[in-house]
Image: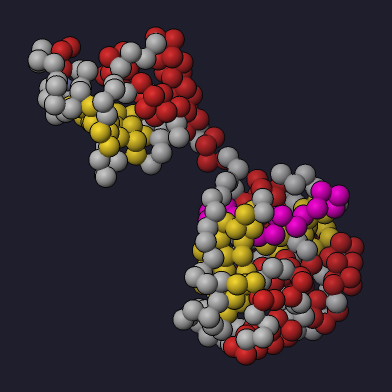
């Protein structure tokens, strides 16, 4: 919650009533300052919206004041704070805080902040896949994982018998050991390929990036990431905030694009961020890291990615032509 909302809440007049819609009502302190008789019928209303914004409305004298992040403190809100008996030095401090927030918003620095994530629930009745191995319905799921050379101990997969999810493997999205989203991958080719609950800026598998590793391998899909212990963008581009989370790991970043036209855009972004790019000479027919691991195995694929990584823009652009078969 914003400091402004927090402060106002702690200075509201006594004898408060809470309504189900979130308003808090009390005897309005404004009326006597506005030429109306003192309110004795709890006609002052205060509400916090979206955790940060505040709004005050008096149904006796009609006085209104509000604030939201990105705005300065209005003279009316400052008056209201005085009537709530907020000390002057706190009002001064909040005035500066609001101004700083506004300047941050103006210069766009807020957008450059590293994303944060809140916990999310997995689909209803989800259970760890290894607890379902006696259930005959998960045979297609196990067969699918096997066909991708992925094993139950490679990741904590989940499964649920609920409609729409039976033929899917659920991949929880972890961040700091909490589930903050998930994707459910179809195992029988039915559309949609993925059903997902994903928060903006999320990068898959960051939790598995042990501090003593020299590189972080950035790939597109979750199975590619699981296959080489890398991180996945969950798409073919680096979205707002994702590069900050990846750079926070403070190690050499190696991007391995899928071998399709969307992969080309990813390479351009990697150059822009100063990351290295690896476009190894995969066997015929291989279009991503997960395919390559199926054929060559993980150690060989890691070795190819690391030894064939390219650092200069010129080398990357030359290699792109062959890799994308231009
Ligand atoms: Zn009033």
User: Quadrant where the N terminus lies?
Assistant: top left
Q: Is residue 132 above or below residue 45?
A: below
Residue at 71% across, 46% down: 247
The image quadrant where one finds ligand 1 is top left
235 or 169: nearer the viewer: 169
303 horizontally vs 92: left or right: right
Residue 4 x %, y %: 41, 26
- In the rendered image, residue 215, in percent from the top left (x then y), is placed at 82, 54
Residue 195 horizontal/vertical position (percent): 51, 72
Identify whether 130 is placed above or below 91: below
Point 52% across, 41% down: residue: 111
Closer to the camera in the image, 309 or 243 = 243
Q: Point out the residue furthest to the top here.
A: 88
Magenta residues, dominant SS class: loop
Q: Is residue 91 visible?
A: yes
Q: Residue 206 falls in which quadrant of the image? A: bottom right
Tell me if 281 is positioned left or right of 89 in this view.
Answer: right
Residue sitting farthest toward the front: 15
Q: Quadrant of residue 306?
A: bottom right
- Residue occupying the point 39% across, 24% down: 10
Q: Position of residue 232 (x, y in %)?
A: 67, 62
In which quarter of the view is residue 309 placed? bottom right
Residue at the location (86% across, 79% down)? 296
Instruction: Count all numbered tags in the image, as a single digit.
Output: 0
Quarter in which the C terminus is drawn: bottom right
Please tell me whether residue 25 belongs to the stretch shown in magenta. no
Q: Nearer the viewer, residue 66 or 35?
A: 35
Q: Is residue 283 above or below residue 197?
A: below
Judging from the image, the colouring scheme is: secondary structure
**Extent of the magenta region:** 199-213
Q: Is residue 287 left or right of residue 280?
A: left
Residue 319 appears in view: no
């Amino acid at each position: 919650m914003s400091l402004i909302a927090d402060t106002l809440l702690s200075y509201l007049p006594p004898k408060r009533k809470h309504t189900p819609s979130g308003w808090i009502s009390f005897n309005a302190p404004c009326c006597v300052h506005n030429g109306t008789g003192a309110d004795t019928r709890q006609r002052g209303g205060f509400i916090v919206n979206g955790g940060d914004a505040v709004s005050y409305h008096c149904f006796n004298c009609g006085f209104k004041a509000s604030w939201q992040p990105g705005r300065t403190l209005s003279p009316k809100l400052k008056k209201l704070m005085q009537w709530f008996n907020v000390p002057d030095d706190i009002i001064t401090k909040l005035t500066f805080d609001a101004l700083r927030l506004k300047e941050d918003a103006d210069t766009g620095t807020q957008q450059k902040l590293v994303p944060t994530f809140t916990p999310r629930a997995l689909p209803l009745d989800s259970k760890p896949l290894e607890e379902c191995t006696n259930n005959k319905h998960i045979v297609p799921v196990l067969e699918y994982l096997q066909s991708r050379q992925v094993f139950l101990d490679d990741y904590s997969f989940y499964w649920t018998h609920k409609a729409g999810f039976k033929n899917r493997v659920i991949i929880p999205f972890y961040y700091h050991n909490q589930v903050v989203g998930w994707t459910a991958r179809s195992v029988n080719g039915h559309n949609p390929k993925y059903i997902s609950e994903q928060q903006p800026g999320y990068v898959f598998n960051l939790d598995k990036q042990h501090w003593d590793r020299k590189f972080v391998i950035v790939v597109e899909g979750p199975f590619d990431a699981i296959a080489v212990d890398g991180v996945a963008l969950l798409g073919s581009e680096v979205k707002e905030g994702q590069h900050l989370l990846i750079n926070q790991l403070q190690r050499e970043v190696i991007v391995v694009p899928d071998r399709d036209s969307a992969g080309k855009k990813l390479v351009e972004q990697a150059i822009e961020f100063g990351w290295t790019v690896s476009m190894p000479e995969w066997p015929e027919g291989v279009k991503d890291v997960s395919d390559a691991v199926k054929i060559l195995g993980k150690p060989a694929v890691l070795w190819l990615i690391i030894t064939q990584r390219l650092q200069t823009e010129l080398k990357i652009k030359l290699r792109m032509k062959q890799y994308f078969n231009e």
